[in-house]
Image (cartoon, grey):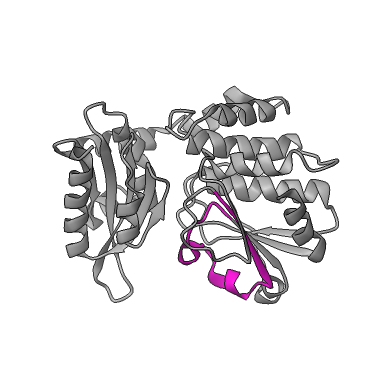
């Protein structure tokens, strides 16, 4: 695989790195970690981390900008994005070639080549495995910080069922790059007073049906608390730690272009496979952590039934 990656990089002087919408720490860590690795090892190449949003991570405040001409002449590397439709900049389709590197099920093989390992706890883990053994490679401290952030967030601090000895081995490899592990933990997981109040609101709005728990943030909820849908959904971990619940979800309403109300959601489970449900509702992701979007009111009502059934049919 390392020869495949190098062959793509050898052919292009401009590389655009893409990831999924509503980016999490792994998507952003993969983007910026890979960008830094290319800069460190191929200093004459131009590299752009592209996307329309940066999520709620203070450490990733701004994406790069590239005009249409640059994008059309570039190699696209798509990281942590299983489906072409979920790429957060559809100009990816205008690139010369696409190399997909991911750890989700490879149902949409949209790359000219697809490097996929579903056993990896994070796309950042897979990237480090691919890059660290390339001859004379440099993985700098800044590069390691980005990759470590992605592993830490996607493994939920090494608590997901996909966490393996390989995950810990790669994390230890990055730790040896002199990164400040306590500082990274504070940066990612310490919360402001506003975030603390948001998490309290999430807890008060929890609905429980058997072993399924969910929260719905209405348009009125978001407006009253000055929240984006992404900010609301990112509190899903507040309810994922309830031991009596097997499946949890946080949904938010938003206005579609035709002014109708549609629904987005973040889904989590402890051991139950739920990404098959997500695929039914215009989404996808890991088997225990995934997202849905653009759901109608009827679809929202139905996904509640589907997730309740998943939580009880273990």
On the image, the x and y values in percent for residue 54 come to 52, 52
- In the picture provided, is 111 more to the left or to the right than 213? right
Q: Residue furthest left?
A: 209
Q: Quadrant of residue 287?
A: top left
195 w.r.t. 49: above or below: above
On the image, the x and y values in percent for residue 184 come to 58, 30
On the image, the x and y values in percent for residue 302 come to 18, 57
Determine the residue positioned at 42% across, 32% down: 161
Tell me if residue 64 is in the magenta stretch: no
The range drawn in magenta is: 79-102
Tell me if residue 97 is in the magenta stretch: yes
- In the picture provided, is 247 more to the left or to the right than 88? left
Q: Nearer the viewer, residue 195 or 141?
A: 141
Tell me if residue 252 can be seen.
yes
- In the picture provided, is 158 more to the left or to the right than 252? right
On the image, the x and y values in percent for residue 187 come to 54, 32
Determine the residue positioned at 39% across, 55% down: 284
24 w.r.t. 47: above or below: above
Determine the residue positioned at 73% across, 56% down: 4
Tell me if residue 228 can be seen.
no
Determine the residue positioned at 65% across, 35% down: 145
Q: Quadrant of residue 296?
A: bottom left
- In the picture provided, is 41 more to the left or to the right than 86? right
159 w.r.t. 103: above or below: above
């Amino acid at each position: 695989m390392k020869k495949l990656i190098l062959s793509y990089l050898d052919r292009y002087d401009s590389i655009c790195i893409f990831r999924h919408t509503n980016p999490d720490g792994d998507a952003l860590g993969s983007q910026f970690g890979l960008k830094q690795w290319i800069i460190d090892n191929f200093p004459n190449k131009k590299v752009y981390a592209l996307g329309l949003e940066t999520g709620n991570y203070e450490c990733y405040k701004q994406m790069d900008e590239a005009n249409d001409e640059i994008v059309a002449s570039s190699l696209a590397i798509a990281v942590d994005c299983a489906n072409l439709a979920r790429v957060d900049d559809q100009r990816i389709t205008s690139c010369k070639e696409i190399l997909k590197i991911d750890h989700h099920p490879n149902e949409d093989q949209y790359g000219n080549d697809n490097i996929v390992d579903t056993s990896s706890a994070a796309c950042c883990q897979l990237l480090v495995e691919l890059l660290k053994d390339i001859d004379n490679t440099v993985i700098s401290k800044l590069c390691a910080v980005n990759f470590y952030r992605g592993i830490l967030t996607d493994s939920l601090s090494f608590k997901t069922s996909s966490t393996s000895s390989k995950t810990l081995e790669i994390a230890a490899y990055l730790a040896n790059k002199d990164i400040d592990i306590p500082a990274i933990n504070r940066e990612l997981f310490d919360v402001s007073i506003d975030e603390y109040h948001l998490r309290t609101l999430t807890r008060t709005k929890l609905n429980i049906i058997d072993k399924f728990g969910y929260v719905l943030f209405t348009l009125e909820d978001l407006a009253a608390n000055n929240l984006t849908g992404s900010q609301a959904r990112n509190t899903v971990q507040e309810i994922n730690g309830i031991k009596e619940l097997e499946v949890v979800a946080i949904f938010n309403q938003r206005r579609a272009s035709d002014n109708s109300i549609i629904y987005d959601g973040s889904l989590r489970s402890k051991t139950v496979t739920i990404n098959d449900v997500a695929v039914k509702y215009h989404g996808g992701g890991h088997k225990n952590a995934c997202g849905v979007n653009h759901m109608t009111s009827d679809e929202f009502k139905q996904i509640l039934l589907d997730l309740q059934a998943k939580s009880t049919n273990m």
